Image (tube, rainbow, N blue to C red):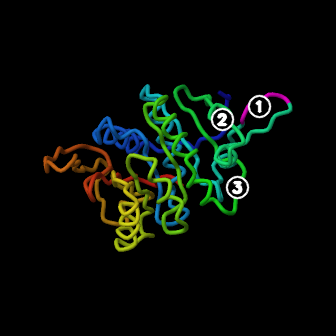
Amino acid sequence: MLEMTIGRFPTLEYETKEAFNTLCANLSFVGKDIKKILITSCRPTEGKSSVSMELLRSLAGLGMKVVLVDADIRASALQGRYDIQVNMPEGKTYLGLSRYLAGYCDVDDILGATNIRGAYIVLSGRNVTNSLPLISSNRLDKLMDELGKRFDIVLVDTPPVGAIIDAAKIARCCDGTLFVVKSGLISKGELLEAMRQMESAGSQILGTVLNQFNEKRYGGGYYHKSYYSQYGNTGSRKKKSHSLSSGGRPGRKENMGGKGIK
């Protein structure tokens, strides 16, 4: 296994930190059989990769052993955005997920322990123009099975559903899908169609994360707001504080209050 250093992480506002804490808590209610979670969106720039990284940090902070797989092998910007450095032996080059799927290396050649305790990453590696043959190979299934044995939670950051078919193909290896939705950008119809695509691929929809929600714009009037949290399909509700709401189709919808993350 390699060593990696995450050199850049944005500072979150208090409300956003609390939203992630609640999101982590809500994920614990989906069941012990849900370990491999695919994270996607309808379009680019909705913040799915940022949510993936923050979930990695938050879950690791709770004492879990978590790995994030950057599965956007066509156009990933994760490594540069977070200044992730891979400590490689002299004379060797990091190959990443794309080269692993092509059969050039093994799991421990692409898996890195980061400078955040409990947080591990598999980077995408060199971008490819034709990802479909790679993500359709049984090497992806083997990787996900192996990571599922080693880690408490496996997070998989994929390309947007509306752009290419990659997310639906990768879904076969995961236990459920979490959608990240940028407030004011996506229509209900577009989101439902994206969810239908993932469900058609056999993926269970775990819920949605509403990102960059402006509460003042939509009538939020209190500094300490209330929200209702609905778990599962029981219909029971518990009143809580802070600016995060849940409920929705068919699992939970997390509202990243304040400015959210980009």
Give the quarter of the figure containing the N terminus.
top right
**Which region is colored magenta?**
86-90
Residue at 47% in and 30% down: 151
Residue at 51% in and 34% down: 146
Magenta-drawn stretch contains 234:
no
Of tags 2 and 3, which is closer to the observer? 2
Q: Nearer the viewer, residue 212 or 89?
A: 89
Mark 3 and mark 1 in contact? Answer it, CB < 8 Å: no
Spatial CA distance of label 3 from label 1 is: 19 Å
Q: Is residue 187 above or below residue 249?
A: below
**Amino acid carrying mark 3 in the image:** Asn
| Outermost residue to the front | 138
In what element is the residue under mark 1?
loop
Q: Return the x and y of residue 227 as percentages of the image width and height.
A: 24, 50
Q: Is residue 169 left or right of residue 177?
A: right
Q: Is residue 196 left or right of residue 163?
A: left
Spatial CA distance of label 2 from label 1 is: 15 Å
Q: What residue is pinned by disc 2?
A: 106
Residue 127 numbered tag: 3
**Amino acid carrying mark 1 in the image:** Met
Q: What residue is pinned by disc 1?
A: 88
**Amino acid carrying mark 2 in the image:** Asp
Residue at 66% in and 43% down: 100
- In the rendered structure, which disc, 2 or 3, sits on the residue that comes first in sequence? 2
Spatial CA distance of label 2 from label 3 is: 18 Å
Q: Return the x and y of residue 186 as percentages of the image width and height.
A: 42, 70
Of tags 2 and 1, which is closer to the observer? 2
User: What main secondary structure does the magenta stretch of the protein show?
Assistant: loop
Give the quarter of the figure containing the C terminus.
bottom right
Residue 170 numbered tag: none
